[in-house]
Amino acid sequence: MSKMIVLVLTAFAVSSAMAANERTLPVSEYRDKMAGGWMGQIVGVTYGAPTEFKRNGSLFEENELPVWKADMVNSCFGQDDIYVEMTFLKTLDTHGIDVSARRAGIDFANSRYRLWCANNNGRNNIRSGIAAPSSSHPKNHKTTDDIDYQIEADFSGLLSPGLPQRVIKLGEQFGRIMNYGDGMYAGQFIGGMYAEAFFENDRVKTVEAGLKCIPRSSKYAQMVRDVLSLYRADP
């Protein structure tokens, strides 16, 4: 294996004549950051799980938050944030990086784990004969804006160091199984931040890179810009 991964970033430019930007990342560094990304996701999911659905419109006080214990990571195997991504990775490993949404949807439909909201509706649509990406269209189910692809899009950025266009495409391949519009853009935004974080340590710049992966006019992008504005006003 080469000691360096050469990453060619397709510029977000109208002119195809504009030269692509090239950045390099040692394989060892990629592996380290990739593993850290997975562990960060696992820790976040397992630490947050005990508080999920416990509040609506209010925050927990600091003394009400769970006490972190290292063995809590083992509960990740029962979290849909994690196990759905394992299906996506298996699909990519079996059918290749350019697998179609339709093929990815078939693998998703054959899964047996519990699902909720957009994931469940999308899977049920495929099982009833509505193939991906039509399985996510608003005319076929009413929860297309739910957070499902947002919570399981981490894989797209971890597989795409410095490659935002690949993140966007993976969203079309997998996010369109269950989500549509802002529901899918949310995942592409998350994936875009992961992809940029391999090279960028500045949090604001990382968020801005994620924004470039989704339509500026989308409600999700407007929300992120509002959060950035509030942060800049009072860090």
Image (cartoon, helix red, strand yellow):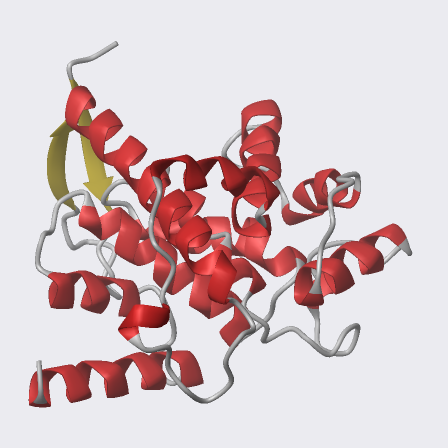
Which residue is farthest front?
Answer: 63
Residue at image position (37%, 82%) is 59
Q: Quadrant of the C terminus?
A: bottom left
Q: Is residue 160 visible?
A: no
Kindly identify the residue that appears in the image at 41 percent across and 49 percent down: 154
Question: How many marks are shown on the rendered structure?
Answer: 0
Residue at x 13% of width, y 40% of height: 22
Q: Can you give x and y, in whole percent of width and height, for residue 44 in the image?
A: 37, 53
Q: Is residue 130 left or right of residue 155?
A: right
Q: Position of residue 84 (x, y in %)?
A: 60, 45
The image quadrant of residue 38 is: top left
Towards the viewer: 18 or 43: 43
- Where residue 6 sits, quadrant-wise, is top left
Q: Could one spot residue 175 in this view of the protein?
A: yes
Quadrant containing the N terminus in the rendered view: top left
Judge from the rendering whether residue 28 lies leftward or rightward of residue 74; answer left or right.
left
Q: Is residue 196 above or below residue 144?
A: above
Residue 79 at x, y percent in the picture: 57, 48
In this view of the protein, which residue sits in the foreground, 31 or 218? 31
- Kindly give the residue lying farthest to the top in the view shown: 1
Residue located 14% across and 82% down the image: 231
Judged left or right of residue 88, residue 235 is left
Q: Residue 215, relative to residue 153: is it above or below? A: below
